[in-house]
């Protein structure tokens, strides 16, 4: 006997009702199966592409926000530059009228400014694998060290380091521990303090927003905040401290 060209699909209802069947050609059934598989693949491809579109849209929104902030900063810088030029002219005239031989230093060109920026020390996240999880190691964000640790000079007291970075940069805890403070501080803005053991704590200040709550347990490398420019701050950066028995120590010596 030759292979049947039809397939019968039977429907068997409960009870004593008679059975019913549908007779379909094999090629039609194969076509339906192929179309069903293509439909499933199409749905998978669609949602995969859609998630990518959403991710790109989110990145675009962040870039637009950053671009708007940069435009505002650029406008402020232009105003400051104009005011500085006018002030230089007034002071120069006053010095000339007073018979004082005084000249302002010339403004450095862009190449000189950027070369000086390149000389700044870069802050790099580099947690050692041999250090215990509850011991701070490495740095919370990547960026440039804009202010060093200094507790010897009372006039320039600074019990941590400042790391210049873009607003919204994820801040990573440098060790496992428990959040003992997650709120707004008048000096450090949105601040997180984490207790790692009985003697060691770390502090993360000037954040834009906080991602943890009081008494929350965190592991080393967890996101605890997004960096910002809150509190007493003149530019976006993260203030990072390590304290042992409530005494500040230089985080750069603990890397």
Image (spheres, helix red, strand yellow):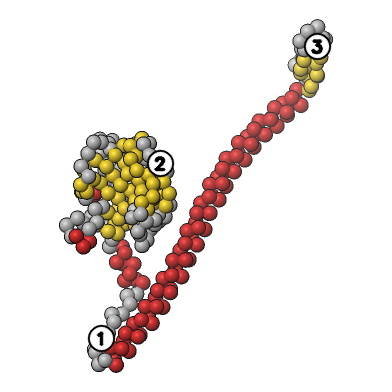
Select label 3 or label 2 by which is in front.
2
Q: Quadrant of residue 90?
A: bottom left
Q: Quadrant of the N terminus?
A: top right
Q: Earlier in the sequence, mark 3 or mark 2?
A: 3
Mark sitting on residue 245 = none
- Which residue does the numbered mark 2 point to in the structure image? 212
Q: Earlier in the sequence, mark 3 or mark 1?
A: 3
Q: Quadrant of residue 214?
A: top left
* Alpha carbons under labels 3 and 2: distance apart: 62 Å
Task: Answer whether labels 3 and 2 touch (C-beta < 8 Å).
Answer: no
Identity of the residue drawn at 56% across and 46% down:
54
**Crowd rating for badge 2 (residues with CA inside 10 Å; few <14, some 14–19, many 20+):** some
> Which residue is farthest left?
152
Percent from the top left, x then y, of residue 127? 28, 42
Mark sitting on residue 102 = 1
**How many numbered tags mark residues here?**
3
Q: Who is closer to the viewer here, 62 or 37?
A: 62
Identity of the residue drawn at 77% across and 15% down:
11
Mark sitting on residue 19 = 3
Q: Secondary structure at mark 2?
A: loop
* Alpha carbons under labels 3 and 1: distance apart: 109 Å
Q: Who is closer to the viewer here, 180 or 59?
A: 180
**Crowd rating for badge 1 (residues with CA inside 10 Å; few <14, some 14–19, many 20+):** few
């Amino acid at each position: 006997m030759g292979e049947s060209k039809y397939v019968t699909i039977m429907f068997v209802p409960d009870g004593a009702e008679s059975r019913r069947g549908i007779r379909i050609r094999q090629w039609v059934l194969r076509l339906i199966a192929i179309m069903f598989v293509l439909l499933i693949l199409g749905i998978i491809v669609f949602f995969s592409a859609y998630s990518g579109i959403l991710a790109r849209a989110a990145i675009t929104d962040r870039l637009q926000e950053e671009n708007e902030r940069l435009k505002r900063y650029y406008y402020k810088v232009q105003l400051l530059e104009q005011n500085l030029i006018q002030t230089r002219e007034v002071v120069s005239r006053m010095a000339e009228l007073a018979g004082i031989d005084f000249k302002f230093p010339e403004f450095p060109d862009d190449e000189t400014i950027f070369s000086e920026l390149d000389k700044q020390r870069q802050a790099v996240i580099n947690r050692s694998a041999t250090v215990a999880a509850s011991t701070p190691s490495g740095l919370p964000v990547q960026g440039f060290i804009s202010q060093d640790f200094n507790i010897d000079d009372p006039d320039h007291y600074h019990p941590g380091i400042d790391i210049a970075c873009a607003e919204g940069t994820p801040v990573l805890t440098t060790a496992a521990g428990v959040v003992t403070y997650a709120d707004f501080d008048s000096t450090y803005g949105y601040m997180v303090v984490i207790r790692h053991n009985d003697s060691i704590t770390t502090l993360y200040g000037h954040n834009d927003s906080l991602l943890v709550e009081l008494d929350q347990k965190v592991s080393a490398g967890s996101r605890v905040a997004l960096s910002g420019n809150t509190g007493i701050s003149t530019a976006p950066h993260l203030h990072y401290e390590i304290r042992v028995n409530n005494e500040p120590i230089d985080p750069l010596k603990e890397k």
